[in-house]
Amino acid sequence: MKTLKILVILLIGGLAISFFSGMLEGKERNNLFAERPAPYKEKKNASAAREISTIKGYDIGDTATDFSLKNTDGSTTSLKDFKDAKGFVIIFTCNHCPYSVAYEDRIIAIDQKYKNVGYPVIAINPNNPKEYPTDSFEAMKVRAKEKGFTFPYLLDAGQKIYPQYGATKTPHVFLLQKEGKNPIVKYIGAIDDKYQDANEVKNTYLENALQALLSGEPIKQTRSTAIGCRIK
């Protein structure tokens, strides 16, 4: 009888251990699959990280090289065309990105306000139309007419200019000031701190930098983080 009780206890204990062991293995198995990233997504993210890391671009104080890009009006535009300019507001932007679309009216307003005092806006679409058909040159011409762009809207055909600057987002701003004949980079980053609503903006990074240049004062914040869509 005593032996039978011992056998029953051992049997129950063995079943309990087996049950709890199975539960733990199941949890570990579930965790394993939950934490494992999808191979395609992991590969895609790694590729994007490598792409961004290879774009060094300009730093504050660097001299920006000139370019010759096709404008939506059919002409070819270069920095050297603006003989009386004191500098330039270079903005990498595009048609499809909601961040860029949200800033269009503000970009027009900045151009109208500052080009007459020597700092015209030059917008450049850096995207590959094969990746984004709505960013094709024909679509750019339509958008420029629809919105009444008051500035050149150029296509970075071959995507050679945006890597020189180091643009990674749309929109991405590079404020240049002429020193002699050289356009020097003075500010890099965002237009302001609230793309969703111009009425809620608290920090107008670009306009602050422009006002400092016009006043002959140092720019207090020469960089900010560009928020927008990744250039492809």
Image: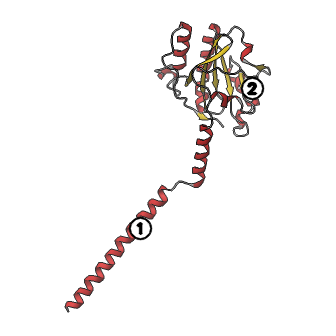
Q: Are there few (<14), some (14-19), or many (20+) residues within 10 Å of tag 2?
A: some
Q: Which mark is residue 207?
A: none
The residue sitting at 64% across, 8% down in the picture is 116
Residue 217, how many percent across, how many down?
A: 51, 9
- Disc 2 on helix, strand or loop? helix
Q: CA distance from mark 1 to mark 2?
A: 61 Å
Q: Quadrant of the N terminus?
A: bottom left
The residue sitting at 60% across, 16% down in the picture is 110
Badge 2 is on which residue?
Answer: 141
Q: Are there few (<14), some (14-19), or many (20+) residues within 10 Å of tag 1?
A: few
Q: Quadrant of the C terminus?
A: top right
Residue 43, how many percent across, how many down?
A: 60, 50
The residue sitting at 53% across, 7% down in the picture is 215
Badge 1 is on which residue?
Answer: 25
Which residue in the rendered view is the most extreme toward the bottom? 1
**Observer-nearest residue: 96 or 32?**
32
User: Residue type at mark 1?
Assistant: Glu
In the shown orientation, is residue 173 left or right of residue 202?
right
Q: Quadrant of residue 62?
A: top right
User: Residue type at mark 2?
Assistant: Lys
- Disc 1 on helix, strand or loop? helix
**Observer-nearest residue: 188 or 119?**
188
Q: Is residue 152 above or below residue 20?
A: above
Residue 61, how many percent across, how many down?
A: 58, 19
Residue 65, how many percent across, how many down?
A: 69, 22
Mark 1 vs mark 2: give the one in front.
Answer: 1
The first of marks 1 and 2 along the sequence is 1
The residue sitting at 19% across, 90% down in the picture is 2
Q: Quadrant of residue 17?
A: bottom left
Which residue in the rendered view is the most extreme toward the right? 74
Which residue in the rendered view is the most extreme toward the left? 2
In the shown orientation, is residue 99 left or right of residue 153?
left
